[in-house]
Amino acid sequence: MAKALNLGMIGYGFMGRAHTNGYKRVADFFPDIPFKPVLKAACARDAEKIKAFADQWGYESIETDWRKLLERKDIDAVDICVPNNLHKEISIAAAKAGKMILCEKPLAMNVAEGEEMCQAVEKAKVANTVWYNYRRIPAVTFAKKLIDEGRLGRIFHYRANFLQDWTISAELPQGGAGLWRLDAAAAGSGVTGDLLAHCIDTALWLNGGIADVSAMTEVFVKERKHALTGKTEKVTIDDACSFLCHFQNGSLGLFESTRYARGHKALYTFEINGEKGSLKWDLHDLHRLEIFEYSNEGATRGWKSVHITDGDHPYMGKWWVPGLAIGYEHSFVHQVADFLYSLGSGEPCHPTFRDALETQKVCDAVISSAKDHSWKKV
Amino acid sequence: MAKALNLGMIGYGFMGRAHTNGYKRVADFFPDIPFKPVLKAACARDAEKIKAFADQWGYESIETDWRKLLERKDIDAVDICVPNNLHKEISIAAAKAGKMILCEKPLAMNVAEGEEMCQAVEKAKVANTVWYNYRRIPAVTFAKKLIDEGRLGRIFHYRANFLQDWTISAELPQGGAGLWRLDAAAAGSGVTGDLLAHCIDTALWLNGGIADVSAMTEVFVKERKHALTGKTEKVTIDDACSFLCHFQNGSLGLFESTRYARGHKALYTFEINGEKGSLKWDLHDLHRLEIFEYSNEGATRGWKSVHITDGDHPYMGKWWVPGLAIGYEHSFVHQVADFLYSLGSGEPCHPTFRDALETQKVCDAVISSAKDHSWKKV
Amino acid sequence: MAKALNLGMIGYGFMGRAHTNGYKRVADFFPDIPFKPVLKAACARDAEKIKAFADQWGYESIETDWRKLLERKDIDAVDICVPNNLHKEISIAAAKAGKMILCEKPLAMNVAEGEEMCQAVEKAKVANTVWYNYRRIPAVTFAKKLIDEGRLGRIFHYRANFLQDWTISAELPQGGAGLWRLDAAAAGSGVTGDLLAHCIDTALWLNGGIADVSAMTEVFVKERKHALTGKTEKVTIDDACSFLCHFQNGSLGLFESTRYARGHKALYTFEINGEKGSLKWDLHDLHRLEIFEYSNEGATRGWKSVHITDGDHPYMGKWWVPGLAIGYEHSFVHQVADFLYSLGSGEPCHPTFRDALETQKVCDAVISSAKDHSWKKV
Amino acid sequence: MAKALNLGMIGYGFMGRAHTNGYKRVADFFPDIPFKPVLKAACARDAEKIKAFADQWGYESIETDWRKLLERKDIDAVDICVPNNLHKEISIAAAKAGKMILCEKPLAMNVAEGEEMCQAVEKAKVANTVWYNYRRIPAVTFAKKLIDEGRLGRIFHYRANFLQDWTISAELPQGGAGLWRLDAAAAGSGVTGDLLAHCIDTALWLNGGIADVSAMTEVFVKERKHALTGKTEKVTIDDACSFLCHFQNGSLGLFESTRYARGHKALYTFEINGEKGSLKWDLHDLHRLEIFEYSNEGATRGWKSVHITDGDHPYMGKWWVPGLAIGYEHSFVHQVADFLYSLGSGEPCHPTFRDALETQKVCDAVISSAKDHSWKKV
């Protein structure tokens, strides 16, 4: 019988919804989890909005000050879904209060912050994880499995990009509740922390550490009206960021992210080329994995499009029947399930804060390289 | 504030899970529904199994006799997820008991049964719907919208197929709990009622009535061990079925279904060609709609792959952000939502039993045509 | 050293160009052919037009009467590229004159004509072939090889279609030099002989004989201005034709052809499903073959897209390097090469007239079935 | 009436064949060309091999010393299809001899050589062109047209890669007739000059000049047996090369090339993103252009796959009918046609030597950047 895990959610935006959906669905599809999430409290400064959110999703209570939430004895774990500039303070306080922490990515504004956060959770010995949810898209998890089995052999190349087009219009303002991702004060960086961080987390997981980087960033629309001040202000985030890198295993990496690639909504793709095979994946068709196998050479060699919907694919035995796809939101359900299993086993749930710090290091090196126009060690 | 709608679920198989998931999720994503489902009771003959199902999914109570369920005053609606040969009896009894009915497809074993069922629900004036869920895949709903707006003009062709490969092995038994779909006594027909019925429902909805058909069916594996008797028995269902038809609007139709198309898991596709444009859809990539527009003629004409994940696509404003796909299960959430909205508005929720009878008529004509080797009026 | 093979071309239209290109290129890429085509004479009633054609393509002389051409001693072989209603007369006369014959498809207006033609060439013992060129698209030839090796096992399904959209406009006239394919007097039938004949030839080659058919045809635009008479006349061809069939090997067939499928230019596709694997091909991407192999089952199973451009793919060793595609016209070069090799070996070059008569038989049965609304034996 | 243009071909390898095919076919399909190529002489040091080549392709005579060829009065133009280290010497001598020059890409071993060559042809006022043939794949030419019409608006991003996998095996030797591309002494560089040069030429043509670059190169197999010496020697070419760049129009570029991308034969792809639209192309499906148009926004927006086979697509009016693809080799036919037209008009045939020097400048900057690990101005 699953024990209750009392959750306090901080934030109510897009990620607040996605995580909550994960908590609510996990027991239906993963009935063997040792803990069952209970939506104890939702927290945000705006009482009216957090009340509406709590009502819609079924949180038992609300708080308007996260410090109050951390004081509550009936909260086992907190989920941090607020802008990046608040991650550090809340995380450290939560760790001190002995709460488990599920923190939205990126971990922090920079490596220095992230290091403090890691030390806090490690000192407090609280379970912690960061929501790099794409690891748990079944096709991506399956890619990891194939790589770990040595199916690709020595790796030569890794490339990834995350392309969007929603900020092309110069009329779009920056800042405020909906658009804090365009404001460096709240977000730390632009596409680097928002999009590339996802690409980097997956890459580190699949292909190991990155040794050095050469990056460039660009701001295409230099000034935008700020939603909070009402004034036209300089845009401080990066609209686009690309970088070259060497992985520690000797393979070459190429990464790109932008919000100015007309026609792409959320096209996160990666490809990895090894001596014995290659893999490709694309978020726009997230239920497929493209596989090329060298052992399959000869006149019938080719790229296979594998429809990742069978019972023997990661997580898929829990869902429907072959041929019937699941979607984006399921990656969060899977991360909740794995977090709960990890509480049972006592093993960490990756990516932990410490794992996510590695991604932060690459992001910092990227930003620094772009600023200095030179290669940087990670 | 949404009123409670007390549900009694009959069955606990694949569809029992899919419908239940729909009931549990609808309020989170459609907070404006006038009624909110309450999982009051789950019912099946096997007490142990229905208990386990009820516990996993959160049904408040169980019943082991559907008649008992129908007697309960605290049940507003029943959901029939049992083999086809039980649809009629339960539906008619439920209608007499004044329960709303959500019946799994196909409606009945044949037209005669279906007609009785329609009369029962119409006489009892109970809300009713049949789970032809594919109408509510957003890409399919969007196709309907485009057609209704006249974007395709006069229709010339409609083609659909539903291809699977899971019964190729002669070792697979027929009958029993998991494989009743291979037993004509329980299922009525093979792929015709199971798969083609879906294709036909969508076709009638998108392209109007079918006038006549010429069909062929085939049984590739003639005998299989029966799971209930343990004996090798003649296979009585159709393994494959194809038919030609004329639609009432003068267009030509071509339909095919099989469980012997190696390499296809659940490949339901349709294409419709009109004077001004064409549309294509494919369940294996259910979040895309392929569109060809004649108004878009000239050197840049071509098929567009539209990623149906934007706020202005049907149902999608309720989910995530552009580029992030939903999956198969969401079609059931949408049907639940529409059923609940229809209770508020007093309008029927299509397809009703009467709508589904039209599909049954085509299925019967198809089976009859295949038997007689001649064209049949529907 | 290759001997000369003196050719007389009858006709100068689309096919006249395609065949001539084949004759001119074959020796460059197939230097080991035992005979080398010499463009001796081009023939058509319109002296000016055939002169222009001969000049452009390098024919040494012209004729304006095919009977004259057949009388010439310096002509070894004739290529018949005129409307279908002239195939019989010219072929029989050519056979009597001892000329080899390369005849454009379909063989004849009907089976009776075709039978006469077969008897004529067989009696005269002249080399003969019919230009069902799609057999020699490398991907299609490769499909044949895989099937013959037993890679698909027992066959369950074969489906093919040939979809175009160029006659949708009611303003398009029928008949005359450019549009004789819309005039039954010249073409015999509409899409059945023009497009389905291709599908049928490939199917018979890949999957063996067809036993019986149930067909429907349709004329969507009932009257069109006739280019020769200037009057609006009844359209006598079939605009669309679909049929069901049984193959002699027990598999089921489904065929469709139309010129009213908006958005498709020349979409000839086929798919074949067997117990051990499946294949798919599409003329719009003619350099690819989609392969599903059952032996490749397990979590990495999927459809492979094989880029048919390697040296170990049929014919491809003669062209460029892996990854570099050839096109439509090369199928004619390959047929010329195979015809010339066959002259060296003394073996027939398939499809011979007799082979093509089998396709004619299916076409006749299809037309007859559509007329009578009943199944017809082939 | 077309005048003769007497050609001398120097070389007989892959490119010798591809260019010759262009010369032989151009008049059949472009009958209005003002000059008609005559295959006057083929030249190479190996008398036996060049004799066989001349016989197969129909060259009237052979030479074994290119200096002799240049002395011949009956030669109007020479085509240079020999390893890169010979381009300069032959070109300058040919210019001095007053011959027109069609030189295989890349122009030279480096910018210094290229500059000399430009000065030579400009001083001699001889017609000159470099075989960057991909400009004349119809889909690529069409992309140029759309960009020049302003259909994409302000450009934000350009990315291209050229991925192959044929040198992964460490057993493959370097150097010699077939593998001189793996020997820096003959080729100058590895993938940079062989593959990236194509990507760069197309990019400069479509998107204008490149301002600066940051590159990395890698040698994955450090030593290979040399085919000429028989000894294992250090590999001196680059196996892989990637670079970031800024275009002069303010857009960002990302380029990658490798011969170690398992599963890719010759995957040259580019994508360009502008404010109003985007384009994508892929050599593996060279007859398609993917187009996204912002003007086409709304619920039906999406990427269109345009099948570049219509009469209103560049060059395609000369070939077959809609839906029927041409292939790789046709790009050479088109370049021959354009070269001949340019002789008639007196306009240069782009890319001229001077145009190709711009690509050389980028290549040199890339190699230099990779060596120094720093950004380089072009």
Image: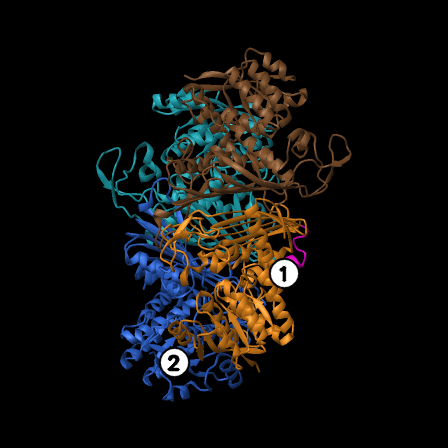
Chain colours: A cyan, B brown, C orange, D blue
Q: Nearer the viewer, residue C61 or C69?
A: C69
Q: Is residue D148 left or right of residue C35?
A: left
Q: Are the residues flagged by discs 1 and 2 in contact, CB closer than 8 Å? A: no
Q: Is residue D373 visible?
A: no
Which residue is labeled 2 in the image? D78
- Which residue in the rendered view is the most extreme toward the top? B73
The image shows residue D351 at horizontal and vertical percentages of: 33, 69
Specify the quadrant that holds the N terminus of chain A. Answer: top right
Q: Which region is colored magenta?
A: C146-154
Q: Nearer the viewer, residue C324 or B353?
A: B353
- Which residue in the rendered view is the most extreme toward the right? B231
Q: Nearer the viewer, residue B122 or C89?
A: C89
Element type at mark 2: strand
Which residue is labeled 1 in the image? C145
Neighbour tally class for label 1: few under 14, some 14-19, many 20 plus, Cα within 10 Å: some
Query: Is B125 rendered above or below residue C77?
Result: above
- Going by the numbered disc 2, the residue's amino acid type is Val
Q: Which residue is depicted at the point 63% across and 61% down?
A: C145
The secondary structure making up most of the magenta span is loop
The image shows residue D23 at horizontal and vertical percentages of: 41, 75
- Going by the numbered disc 1, the residue's amino acid type is Lys
Element type at mark 1: helix
Please check the rendered image and state whether residue C248 is part of the magenta-colored stretch, yes or no.
Answer: no
Q: Is residue B174 visible?
A: yes
Neighbour tally class for label 2: few under 14, some 14-19, many 20 plus, Cα within 10 Å: many
Q: Quadrant of residue B225?
A: top right
The image shows residue C169 at horizontal and vertical percentages of: 38, 50
Viewer-nearest of labels 1 and 2? 1
